[in-house]
Amino acid sequence: DQQVKQNSPSLSVQEGRISILNCDYTNSMFDYFLWYKKYPAEGPTFLISISSIKDKNEDGRFTVFLNKSAKHLSLHIVPSQPGDSAVYFCAASAFRETSGSRLTFGEGTQLTVNP
Amino acid sequence: DTEVTQTPKHLVMGMTNKKSLKCEQHMGHRAMYWYKQKAKKPPELMFVYSYEKLSINESVPSRFSPECPNSSLLNLHLHALQPEDSALYLCASSQGQGYSYEQYFGPGTRLTVT
């Protein structure tokens, strides 16, 4: 049961344009969402997060939007740069009193930014 | 310092070998995690330690044995592995095992079981 889905395995964008990466989730208990970037042969790097009490969080070129009613979030990168080329993972978490947090990852989207 | 270090970077082991993976962080984080990642797949949680105690074991086979000697160190002991255990093993840490605490990942150990 894939609780976090990234339906686009790949996305190609021109340098300077906007990159929009999408993520859908099914578990209504998720209340915290994160985006990670991963280069080959490296561990995932935390990018940006958003709590379910917000609908937008911005950090420099990166903005995450959350639509709780649609169970959908998206990551916008503006302007896109060639160095942004990487696999982007969406992750979600639900607080559990006994076991704490557990991240559930999507399958990832390979972003390629062309010069 | 937001670094999580992992050693070794690469490991090749036979099915009868015993080896260990090591992870270290000096951010004062109190939760540490082991993940397994296969090619073109997302990381899968294996174990969680919170305040040096094992709090989550995701039904991992006993040939994987975690250990947390202190709040900065996390080991994963490997014994009698199978070729299908070949993967990238990632360590992560977070401030606490609360829902809003971002996890910081190490670079991983690329394990090949022959």
Image (spheres, rainbow, N blue to C red):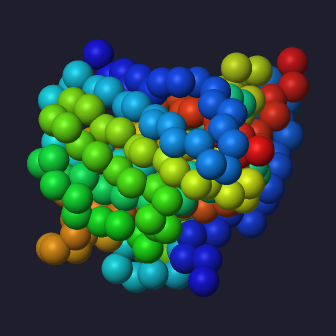
In terms of depth relative to the viewer, which is nearer, A16 or A88?
A: A88
Rendered location of residue B57, percent (x, y) = 35, 67
Up-down relation of residue A100 to residue B104 (above or below) = below
How many dots with numbers? Answer: 0
Side of B51 where B23 appears, left or right: right
Side of B38 where B77 appears, left or right: left
Can residue B113 be seen in this snapshot? yes
Quadrant of the rendered image containing residue A2: bottom right
Residue drawn at x 77%, y 44% as measured from the top left:
B114
On the rendered image, what quadrant is the N terminus of chain B found in? top left
Rendered location of residue B65, percent (x, y) = 39, 54
Residue drawn at x 74%, y 54% as measured from the top left:
B83
Side of B100 where B81 appears, left or right: right
Up-down relation of residue B78 to residue A24 (above or below) = above
Side of B107 where B75 appears, left or right: left
Quadrant of the rendered image containing residue B88: top right
In terms of depth relative to the viewer, which is nearer, A51 or B70?
A: B70
In terms of depth relative to the viewer, which is nearer, A114 or A2?
A: A2
Rendered location of residue B69, percent (x, y) = 19, 38
In terms of depth relative to the viewer, which is nearer, A64 or B96?
A: B96
Can residue B45 be seen in this snapshot? no
Rendered location of residue B97, percent (x, y) = 21, 55
Residue drawn at x 78%, y 59% as measured from the top left:
A8
Residue drawn at x 46%, y 35% as measured from the top left:
B21
Up-down relation of residue B48 to residue A99 (above or below) = above
